[in-house]
Image: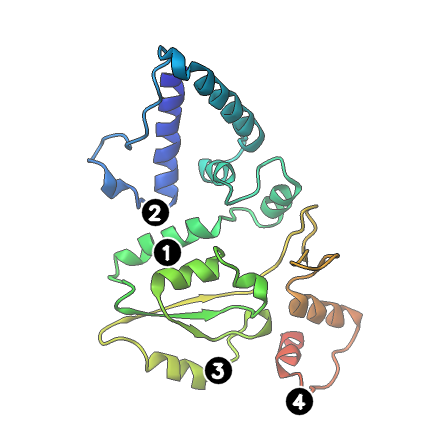
Amino acid sequence: RVAEFHFHCQQVAESFSAAMGGGASAERGAGSAPVLPQAPAAAESANKLTFDRCWEELDGKMGNDFDAGIGPVQSVSAWLGVAPPANHPTYKSLHSNFPGSLPGQVVLRRCIAATRQYGLTPENTIYGQSTCPDEINNEAGDLASIMQEHWGECFPMGGIGGAPYVGQTGFMAFSHHVPEDGHVLVLFGPHVAISATGEIGKYKRIGQAKESTACGAVLAAYNACCAGPVEADDPLDMQQNWLKQK
């Protein structure tokens, strides 16, 4: 059973490494299997009880998190706790509405792998970010946070809804900060929450008793457009006006 599971781990590790952008390939010889921790010998009676108990816990976790109908990246991500398990309402809503969604850690590794061939490194690249200033986009461990941790100092470009409101002037200033013979990398786009019950656009924020909308600005603009003609521009709400117009 140990050998069988060890072989399964090798297969999953190979698939996960490829999905992550091949980052682990350099850590092993060409054509060889990834180096994995060796399981304790079953003959060691002193450790047998602990070893069997670990297997029972592992089997239970795998049974809950793994699903033969989904890919290895999603399965392993759920097992590692960086994505919801396949039997969770959030997972089902996420992948039914946004097929192919990946955890931020996977996106970062794929970004590094994809840009490596063009010579991008944290030392020769300036990183810009056009995402909504919503605090849930900047929590530790989220994509925006780990991108900054890897690529270094960030030039913020986005306003509510994630649009690059800095405009031509802001982007010109950004481009003047590029290292000599260096590169520009920009993360951009809106965000949307999924609640624990699988509802799109809802999120229970820390310290609040009820769920609120996310992205609140985009959803408010959408609802305003659905309600009828968009009102005249408000000079005190220019970013929201732009969302409504678009």
Which type of secondary structure does the marked residue at label 4 adopt? loop
Q: Is mark 2 on a helix, strand or loop?
A: loop
Q: Residue at x 66, y 83 (%)?
A: 237
Above or below: residue 29 compared with residue 204: above
- Foreground: 135 or 40? 40
CB-based contact (under 8 Å), mark 2 and mark 1: yes
Residue at horizontal 50%, vertical 75%? 164
The location of residue 27, given as percent across then percent down, is: 24, 40
**In the image, is 191 to the left or to the right of 204?**
left
- Examine the rendered structure and indicate whether residue 180 appears above or below residue 212: below
Q: Residue 111 carries which label?
A: 1
Residue at 39% in and 43% down: 19
Identify the mark nearer the N-term, 4 or 3. Answer: 3
Name the disc covering residue 21, or none.
Answer: 2
Q: Residue 179's spot in the image, x, y percent?
A: 26, 75
Q: How far apart are marks 3 and 2 (CA)?
A: 33 Å
Q: Name the residue under label 3.
A: 167
45 lies left or right of 139: left
Q: Nearer the viewer, residue 206 or 182?
A: 206
* Residue type pointed to by label 4: Pro
Q: Do residues under tags 1 and 4 come within 8 Å of each other at their CB atoms? A: no
How far apart are labels 2 and 4 at the CA level?
Answer: 46 Å
Q: Do the residues labelled 3 and 2 touch (CB within 8 Å)?
A: no
Residue highlighted by disc 4: 235
Q: Which quadrant of the figure contains the C terminus?
A: bottom right
